[in-house]
Image (cartoon, helix red, strand yellow):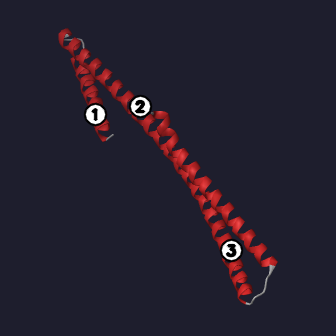
């Protein structure tokens, strides 16, 4: 990008010098004037080409930045979803541990507590559901990552 700015600066300087030379020559020296006009036109064409290249590079950069910003937003959303699922799994696993501890205590005392068995089974079922949701999200993330690669192939 710095090279382009330097080229542009040099071209503008050359155009200024050529314009000043034309002004100084005035009407005298038709051959020199024709040559200077040709050089001036060549510099103008080169300047236009450089401006087009700069414009194309700028558009490409803007497109890339927009794409990267979109990817970052998607990744942040996925991370928040994952974090929520992890928090839910932790909560469910804590409830499962507590329920299992109550069940062990009741079993150690020789007490058959059907509600503790039911509570334990419900906690385990919820834990499996949370794990399934986390696995599904992970699979969706993998597929989303692979999709662009597969489309290119």
At label 1, counting other C-alpha atoms closer than 10 Å, the crowd grade (few under 14, some 14-19, many 20 or more) is: some
Q: Which mark is residue 96?
A: 3
Position of 19 with respect to 129 (left or right) is: left
| Mark whose residue sits in front, 3 or 2 | 3
Residue 59, position in %: x, y?
A: 45, 34
Name the element at disc 1.
Answer: helix
**Closer to the camera, 146 or 96?**
96
Quadrant placement of the C terminus: top left
The secondary structure type at the circle numbered 2 is helix
Which residue is farthest top? 30
At 65% across and 72% down in the image, what residue appears? 93
Label count reads 3
Q: Nearer the viewer, residue 147 or 41?
A: 147
Which is more N-terminal, label 3 or label 1?
1
Q: Are marks 1 and 3 in contact (CB under 8 Å)?
A: no
Q: Are marks 3 and 2 in contact (CB under 8 Å)?
A: no
Label 3 to label 2: alpha-carbon separation: 59 Å
Q: Which residue is mark 1?
A: 7
- Cβ atoms under marks 2 and 1 closer than 8 Å: no
For the view shown, which residue lies furthest in the front direction? 110
Q: Which residue is mark 2?
A: 56
| Among the 4 quarters of the image, the one containing residue 36 | top left
Locate residue 135, reporting x and y percent.
Answer: 60, 56
The answer to whether residue 137 is seen in the rendering is yes
Q: Viewed as shown, does residue 64 lie left or right of 43?
A: right
Say which label, 3 or 2, has the lower sequence index.
Answer: 2
**CA–CA distance in space, label 2 to label 1:** 16 Å
Is the residue 129 above or below the residue 116 in the image?
above
Depth order, front residue of 135/61: 135
Task: Give percent across and percent down for residue 116.
Answer: 77, 78
Specify the label residue 109 is tagged with.
Answer: none
Earlier along the polypeptide chain: callout 2 or callout 1? 1
């Amino acid at each position: 990008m710095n090279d382009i700015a330097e080229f542009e600066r040099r071209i503008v300087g050359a155009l200024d010098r050529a314009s000043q030379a034309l002004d100084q020559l005035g009407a005298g020296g038709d051959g020199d004037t024709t040559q200077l006009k040709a050089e001036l036109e060549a510099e103008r064409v080169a300047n236009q080409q450089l401006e087009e290249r700069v414009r194309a590079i700028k558009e490409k950069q803007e497109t890339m930045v927009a794409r990267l910003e979109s990817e970052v937003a998607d990744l942040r959303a996925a991370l928040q979803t994952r974090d929520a699922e992890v928090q839910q799994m932790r909560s469910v696993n804590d409830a499962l541990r507590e329920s299992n501890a109550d069940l062990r205590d009741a079993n150690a005392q020789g007490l058959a507590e059907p509600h503790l068995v039911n509570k334990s089974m419900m906690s385990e079922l919820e834990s499996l559901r949370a794990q399934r949701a986390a696995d599904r999200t992970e699979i969706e993330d993998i597929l989303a990552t692979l999709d662009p690669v597969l489309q290119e192939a």
